[in-house]
Amino acid sequence: MAKIAVETPLEDVKQALEEKGHDVFMFTNEEEAKGANLAVVRTLNEIDADAEQFDFPFVSMEGASVDEIVADVEQRLTR
């Protein structure tokens, strides 16, 4: 099962992903997200410039509903 990191304070996203059966954990910085297959963040602007070092994609919550984020995450995990 894929591990999904969700940026604190996006508890509603974490809960929605868990309800879909995903393995989800919260993080406060990119270092804590290591080991994830995918990370959900508030905005990509807050990700450090060296985020390319991570071997997983980041999904931005900016302008999206929780349902849209869950759908995006599930689509990315099936690629």
Image (cartoon, grey):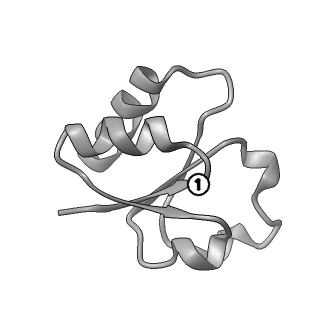
Q: Where is 50 relative to 46, above or below?
A: below
Residue at (77, 73) in percent of width and height: 50
User: What is the three-letter code of the residue carrying label 1?
Assistant: Glu
Left or right for 12, reference 15:
right
Residue nearest the observer in this picture, 54 or 17: 17
Residue at (72, 47) in percent of width and height: 44
Q: Secondary structure at mark 1?
A: strand
Left or right for 60, reference 55:
right
Residue nearest the observer in this picture, 31 or 55: 31
To which residue does mark 1 refer? Answer: 7
Left or right for 51, reference 34:
right
10 Å crowding of disc 1: few (<14), some (14-19), many (20+): many
Residue 66 picture location, percent across and down = 46, 26
Residue 64 picture location, percent across and down = 58, 22
Residue at (55, 43) in percent of width and height: 10
Left or right for 33, reference 68:
right
Residue 72 picture location, percent across and down = 40, 33
Quarter residue 43 falls in: top right
Residue nearest the observer in this picture, 75 or 9: 9
Residue 73 picture location, percent across and down = 38, 41
Label tally: 1
Quadrant of the frame with the N terminus: bottom left
